[in-house]
Amino acid sequence: MQAIVINHAGGPEALQLQEVPTPQVKPGWSLVKVKGFGINHSEIYTRKGESPSVHFPRILGIECVGEIAETTAPDQLPVGQRVVSLMGGMGREFDGGYAEYALLPNEQLYPVATKLSWAELAAVPETYFTAFGSLQHAHITEATALLIRGATSGVGVAAIKLAKAMNPAVTVSGSTRRQAKFAELQAIGCDHPVLDEAGHLPAANRYDAIVELVGAKTLQDSLAHLLPGGYCCVTGGLGDQWTVPDFDPFALPNGASLTNFESGAAINGPAFNALLQLIDQHHIDVAPRQTFDLAHTADAQAALEASDSFGKVVVLV
């Protein structure tokens, strides 16, 4: 089969299209014919050598969508069944989705029934599930004013779209470091684009729900904009900073809550299908912003890294 293999840390050019043996099924694992996969910032960090637990050579890819090609669980995962998979060690502990076929544990293959195209479905797993869970942890159904910190990222765009479906009454603000992206944010349903200037938002802005996608780098500033009794859910690490030096827990407003969401700990079949049902019922546009083929996966990663990136980038196999 063809796969994108990384043999050493580096730039996008370190991702090489190679011919490799197709994996053979083993007990408890099934073979998926990959139809597509999303590109994620965590894979870029791994490509750069910033994931110490990942050893090269490796086929990256923490998610994929496709069909069962060979199965060791024919009752639950018959050949031809449409499935999604994400996290659980994909592309890190074992080879992931950047390939024509992926050998994956049965327990993390989730059967789906959906009318979404392969391109649309490929945009959903990690990105929309992360946004979905983060909004739930931020108590979106009770919120009146929501801030998405890092709104032009794939998860940010997904969160804006899902928020309006989960709570039509909520007012959505989304931060970006580039004012040129304001119109794009408004076009997808962001009520109030907000300029992030050197890690700071306008002082007067206040929210009762915050989804923090930039991460530790802007967390303390985000907390300064949280209303008493509100919720801030830390999800992402777009700022490439993983700890908050000299964190003051009393920076939290009175009665407010700081929580987090990690998709790998939360994913299961019913939860993922609940997300698909929400997308279906509300006709949410989940189409990716950019699409590449397998041979141009390096270009797909470069596109996600670019300063003008907006929304989800996927590869169709």
Image: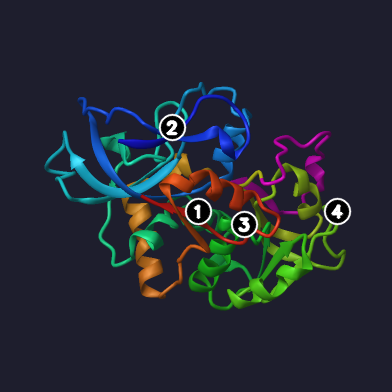
Left or right: 186 as drawn, with respect to 225 = left
- Amino acid type shown at disc 2: Ile
C-alpha separation, residue under disc 4 versus residue under disc 1: 26 Å
Say whether marks 3 and 4 touch (CB < 8 Å): no
Q: What SS does tag 1 mark?
A: helix
- The amino acid type of the residue labelled 1 equals Thr
Residue of label 4 = 198
Q: Earlier in the sequence, mark 2 or mark 1?
A: 2
Residue at 29 percent across and 42 percent down: it is 109
**Viewer-side label of 2, 4:** 2
Q: Tell whether position 153 is magenta.
A: no
Question: Would you say 69 lies left or right of 190 here?
Answer: left
Q: How many marks?
A: 4
Residue position for label 1: 127
- Could you give the CA–CA distance between mark 2 and mark 1, rounded to whole angstroms? 20 Å
Left or right of 294, for residue 188: right
Image quarter of the N terminus:
top left
Label 2 crowding class (10 Å Cα cut-off): few <14, some 14-19, many 20+? many
Q: Residue at x 64, y 58 (%)?
A: 309
| Residues drawn in magenta | 238-261
Residue ranking furthest to the left: 75
Q: Quadrant of residue 140?
A: bottom right
Per the model, the C-alpha gap separating discs 3 and 2 is 24 Å
Which amino acid type is shown beneath numbered disc 3? Ser
Secondary structure at numbered mark 3 = loop
Which residue is under mark 2? 59
Q: Secondary structure at mark 2?
A: loop
